[in-house]
Image (tube, rainbow, N blue to C red):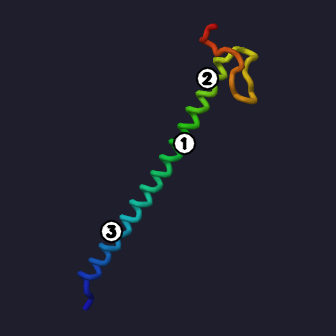
Amino acid sequence: MIAWPKILGGVLVLAAITWVVLEIREDGARSVTNAFERQNNAAAHSAGDARADYDTCPDGLWDFRTSKCRGPAAGRRN
């Protein structure tokens, strides 16, 4: 005679283990995606800050080698 309760119990245990593994993988993928998004946001803020520094520098005073303004920044008066 076939032991249906044991087979059913084994199938349920296998389904539970599969569900746990899939949840862990999904959580890991979400974590990696969040890390990439945080890195992209930081890069965008850095680029925006650099662009703002360049935009506020008077024409002809930007030093591309050092990425800094050689003269007084716009908005400051001497």
Residue at x 45%, y 56% (from the top left corner): 28
- Type of amino acid at the residue the image marks with label 2: Ala
Which residue, given by chain and number where applicable, does mark 2 sit on? 52
What whole-number distance in Å separates the C-alpha atoms at marks 2 and 3? 54 Å
* Relative horizontal placement of residue 41, taking residue 7 as reference (left or right): right
Closest to the observer, 35 or 25: 35
Q: Residues within 10 Å of mark 1 (few under 14, many from 20)?
A: few
Whether residue 56 is situated above or below residue 35 in the rendered picture:
above
Kind of element beneath mark 3: helix
Residue sitting at 59 percent across and 27 percent down? 49
Label for residue 39? 1
Which image quadrant is residue 65 in? Answer: top right
- Looking at this view, is 38 or 67 the one in front? 67
Query: Which element type, helix, strand or loop, lies under badge 2?
Result: helix
Residue 18 location, quadrant: bottom left
Which element type, helix, strand or loop, lies under badge 1? helix
Residue 16 bears which disc, if any? Answer: 3
- Identify which amino acid the numbered label 1 is placed on: Gln
Q: Earlier in the sequence, mark 1 or mark 2?
A: 1
In which quadrant will I find the N terminus?
Answer: bottom left
Check disc 3 and give the amino acid type. Ala
Distance of mark 1 from mark 3, alpha carbons?
A: 35 Å
Camera-nearest residue between 71 and 56 = 71
Extreme residue toward the bottom, this view: 1
Tell me what residue is drawn at x 26 percent, y 82 percent.
6
Residue 52 position (above or below residue 2): above
